[in-house]
Amino acid sequence: MPTLADVAREAGVSSAAASSALSGAKGSTRVSVETRERVLAAAARLSYRPNATARALTFQRTNAIGFVANIANEEPNLYFLEIFSGVVRGATQAQQSTSIFPLGGWEEAPKRIPALCDGRVDGLVVLARQLEDDSTTWLPPHTPMVTIHAGPLLQAQVNVEADDEAGGYTIARHMLELGYRRILCMGGPVNVKGADVRVDGFLRAHAEAAVEVASDHLIRTWFTAEGGRQAMREWLQRHRGQPLPEAVCCGSDDIAFGCIEALQSCGLSVPRDISIAGFDDTLMARALGMTTVRQPLLEIGRRAVEALMQLIEAQRRGEAYEGPRDIVLPVEIVHRRTLPGPRSEPLTIP
């Protein structure tokens, strides 16, 4: 492959002049318009392409960002895919390339994340939902980082998330306004911030409506279809012969998908026998016509990249980042067929 020295020789200029002409940098080596055109013509004749590594060293930018996520689960993760689509959209707008750095579990984060901050990317977007480490002293200070839905244990420079508490509150209030009273809450895992505050919102709506939530109507499970499937199956087995809840309010779409499978395996139909609502509004929820709380997943990913680019630029200039540290985007209910209103006659769990 032709080198910068080859281009300089072809154009009859020094390597420094050729570099300045090709990069358009305002350095100590200034070139005339005529010299610049001669260098560009020589580069075109030789089919010269700048060396990305050399340019990164010169400009202290790789024009690449990393996306870190725990994707060890065997199930397709639609939440991850839609967030990542937003990240790619934001990176494309910012003319950045994107690399995915998967984790086999959040216990790998204290070793894995610092290892990624070796100059291969200018910054990281971390999809941090279930970080279990109780210390963040391992976070590299030299690499800008933005988290998405981070828990309190991971304090990066900026965090982007949806208004989870408002989502849990709004969907529960809507169900109560439709006339549902016996609502089973199938929330996400305990000690995960987003899951906890969604349940808080569910309970707040019931408290305001003076509707008591039975102790056995509040279940916590993983943000997966298998988590919802197993939790619902076990709950139904424990409550055989008892009244079937009128509806299930789920902490994620994936949990709701698992609940629907477990209900169907018992001969129960959604929404004929029992209603259900999810949280996320992923592609599958849209395909199934499931009522859910819509998080702006694409926009969350895009905004994370936007904030990361601001952090990177502030660091390059040696300036303090002046943007928001906590970016919380609104949610909304998407009304579909799985929440038509309570049955006139209660059913018994088979």
Image (cartoon, grey):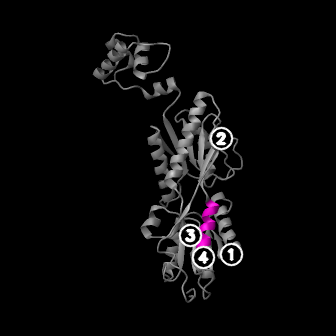
Q: Distance between the residues labelled 1 and 4?
A: 9 Å
* Up-down relation of residue 60 to residue 195 (above or below): above
Q: Which of the labelled discs sits on residue 177, or is there none?
A: 4
User: Badge 3 local density, few (<14 within 10 Å), some, or many (20+)?
Assistant: many
Q: How far apart are marks 3 and 1 (CA)?
A: 27 Å
Q: Which of the labelled discs sits on residue 228, or is there none?
A: 3
Q: Position of residue 103 (x, y in %)?
A: 55, 49
Question: Which of the marked residues, 1 or 4, is nearer the chain's N terminus?
Answer: 4
Left or right position of 250 against 13: right
Q: Distance between the residues labelled 4 and 3?
A: 25 Å
Q: Which of the labelled discs sits on residue 209, or is there none?
A: 1
Q: Which of marks 1 and 2 is in front?
A: 1
Q: Which of marks 2 and 4 is in front?
A: 4
Q: Distance between the residues labelled 2 and 4?
A: 46 Å
* Up-down relation of residue 155 to residue 285 (above or below): above
Question: Which of the marked residues, 2 or 4, is nearer the chain's N terminus?
Answer: 2
Q: Position of residue 114 (x, y in %)?
A: 61, 39
The magenta region covers 164-175
User: Badge 1 local density, few (<14 within 10 Å), some, or many (20+)?
Assistant: few
Question: Which of the marked residues, 1 or 2, is nearer the chain's N terminus?
Answer: 2
Q: Nearer the viewer, residue 152 or 135?
A: 152
Q: In which quarter of the image is the C terminus?
A: bottom right
**Residue 10 seen in the current view:** yes
Q: Nearer the viewer, residue 274 or 51?
A: 274
**Residue 103 seen in the current view:** no
Residue position for label 2: 139
